[in-house]
Amino acid sequence: MAFKDYLKEFVDLSIAIVAIPLAVWLFVIAPNEAPGLYEDGIQPWLYPRIVLAVFIFFCTLMAFIAVKGRSQSGNAPGATLQQERSASMTREAFLNAIVPAGLTILYVVGTIWIGYIYTTAIIAGLYMRYLGATLLGALVVAIGITVVIYFVFGDLLNIPLPHGRLFE
């Protein structure tokens, strides 16, 4: 049991150690080209490779932060775990468990009814406000994310995005 408790302190590092080799393996085995599908330059294999490259970058960053944070904290193994166990569940912990799931459900339902573009901007803005962003910052980032994703999927990759039942 003590070994299991000790490992819980290294969750981020453990996830990175497993995820990085898996992502590198998937990146290597992904096909380099799909001949004859698109002659205008953009190939279908490009998107999975971009996603895997970003995933590898973030996993490496997560591992680096975990190692750096562990080396800077002088706590004995198990001390933080005992402090976390002794703390009672607060309203914030409950909201942190419920709000992302609720917003995900709203996102799916909203995409069906009002379409991808509006739902993405609304849900991204709401989630950023929940995380503590200013109203202006939430609006700018939510609209920016929506425009970039719409451009990448709609224009660059020619993937049709849902318009919603209200706009059909």
Image (spheres, helix red, strand yellow):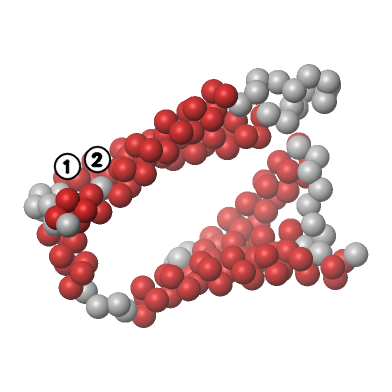
The amino acid type, in three-letter code, at marker 1 is Ser
Image position of 20 (left or right of 128): left
Label 1 Cα crowd, 10 Å radius (few <14 / some 14-19 / many 20+): few
Rendered residue at 46%/33% (across/down) = 22
Q: Is residue 75 visible?
A: yes
Name the outermost residue toward the front: 1
Image position of 11 (left or right of 53): left
Residue 63 in the image, given as x and y percentages of width and height: 32, 39
Q: Nearer the viewer, residue 5 or 139?
A: 5
Q: Disc 2 designates what residue?
A: 67
Q: Nearer the viewer, residue 52 or 119?
A: 52
Q: Nearer the viewer, residue 147 or 140?
A: 147
Q: Quadrant of residue 48?
A: top right
Q: Disc 1 designates what residue?
A: 71
Mark 2: which secondary structure? helix
**Residue 166, above or below 78:** below
Residue 1 in the image, given as x and y percentages of width and height: 17, 57
**Residue 29, above or below 151:** above
The amino acid type, in three-letter code, at marker 2 is Val
Rendered residue at 71%/68% (across/down) = 110
Mark 1: which secondary structure? helix
Estimate the spatial distance between the alpha carbons at disc 1 and disc 2, rounded to whole Å.
Answer: 6 Å
Q: Is residue 61 visible?
A: no
Say if mark 1 contacts mark 2, CB within 8 Å: yes
**Residue 33, above or below 117:** above
Image position of 89 (left or right of 75): right
Residue 109 in the image, given as x and y percentages of width and height: 70, 69
